[in-house]
Image (cartoon, rainbow, N blue to C red):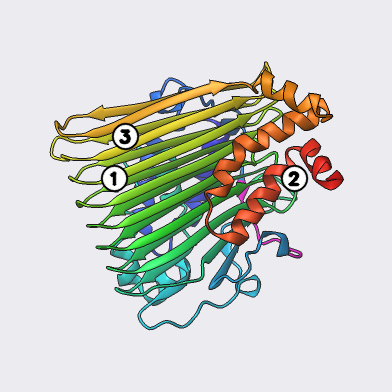
Amino acid sequence: MTAFADGLRDQFALRAQGPLRLLREAAFARFAKLGLPTTQDEDWKYTSLAPLAQMPFEPGAAAAIGAIDRWTLADSAARLVFVNGKHRPELSSPAPRLRGAFIGSLAVALAERPDLVERELARHADDQREAFTALNTAFLEDGAFIHLPAGMVLEAPIHLLYLSAAPGNPAHSHPRNLIVAGANSQATVVETYAGVADDTYFTNAVTEVVLGENAHLHHYKLQEESARAFHVALTQVRHGRDSRFTSHSVALGAALARNDVRARFASEGSECTLNGLYMATGKQHLDNRTLIDHESPRCTSRELYKGVLDGQSRGVFSGRVLVRQDAQKPDASQANKNLLLSDDAIVNTKPQLEIFADDVKCAHGAAVGQLDENALFYLRSRGIGQEAARSLLTYAFASEMVNLVPLGPLRARVRDLVTSKLPAFERLKEAA
């Protein structure tokens, strides 16, 4: 057993009581059987968890948090703040009182409306074969629960802000989010994961999304964890008939991060769009894995992920589009584009199409390249310095993904974070 697994086993033995005890015990047994993935597992071929496996983590304790303004979003319908995985009402803004809806803490919902929660909780994310999902279920305590009744339309976004702090020993937390959108409902949900300080901690998050018929959900995830953090997350979506799901994933932080997004077209006529941007420097390792399962006919999926790698960093993209035999007339496209800014940066990209139907419209591709020398020469000839020219072209590459974010306050936040990784670009803006 590793230091990581030994510590978790002892901690779970002390915390196994309480709500959902049988569910949690079964999940921990599965995690113990599965163990941490290794590079021998195809799904983890390019991502070694050895640094995580050797580190003993303790449960995240209550921590004092100062101002949180730099992470908040203006004009949100509700802001739910969690510190080390636990809801902090005093830092949150109250959710609107909407008839038939619930927007709040999962722990509160389990106590007050258990039947509503347990109808969908842990029924979509795979904790039978996925070790981290099983671990999340085993330590399931809190997170966000959003339930929208049929026909409800929320114009303003719901912001889920997860902050981590581990001023002492390395800490771990396991947020669990459940979003259930009834028929013809519409909403926007933003998940932000950030470190309060440059602490060492492990965040293992799972979000289950259940879309009713003709439900529309815009989902954003911004990962800006501390430079010494570990971050593993899964977003699992189940589509109802004619439902729409749009995802914007931005990964900028953590020493090692893995982000999985999986969409299952359980009914026909649905649409899914997955957009992603990952930027790494130093020795960061950012891994992105997606699965779009065309289980039903006449469904549409669009996917575009871009990566920018500098220093000795490593990026991984593995995107799988599965078209099952009965899923006729799908329309699917997938692309992954990567920009390497140094000779030591590495990217492993693996777009995949698995097609078992006859009448299909599918395409996929990947590209890896460096900055255009002709474009650099042109900018240099116009009096722009070498580093400023490199930063300008790098931002031009990344800005496509920034501009795809339709939510104004979040787009501005992402733009600021992206340019902060390009100091020469910032100086160029100041001089303009």
Three-letter amino acid code of the residue under disc 1: Thr
User: Gap in Å between the C-alphas at discs 1 and 2?
Assistant: 41 Å
Q: Earlier in the sequence, mark 3 or mark 1?
A: 1
Could you say where residue 298 lies in the image, as x and y percent from the top left? 20, 46
Which residue in the protein does label 3 denote?
Answer: 321
Tell me if residue 150 is in the magenta stretch. Answer: no
| Relative side of 270 to 284, left or right | left
> Which portion, as a residue range, is magenta?
58-67
In this orientation, which residue lies closer to the viewer: 189 or 362? 362
In this orientation, which residue lies closer to the viewer: 39 or 28? 39
Which residue in the protein does label 2 denote?
Answer: 198
Three-letter amino acid code of the residue under disc 2: Asp
Three-letter amino acid code of the residue under disc 3: Val
Q: Nearer the viewer, mark 1 or mark 2?
A: 1
Could you say where residue 11 lies in the image, as x and y percent from the top left? 53, 49
Chief secondary structure of the magenta portion: loop
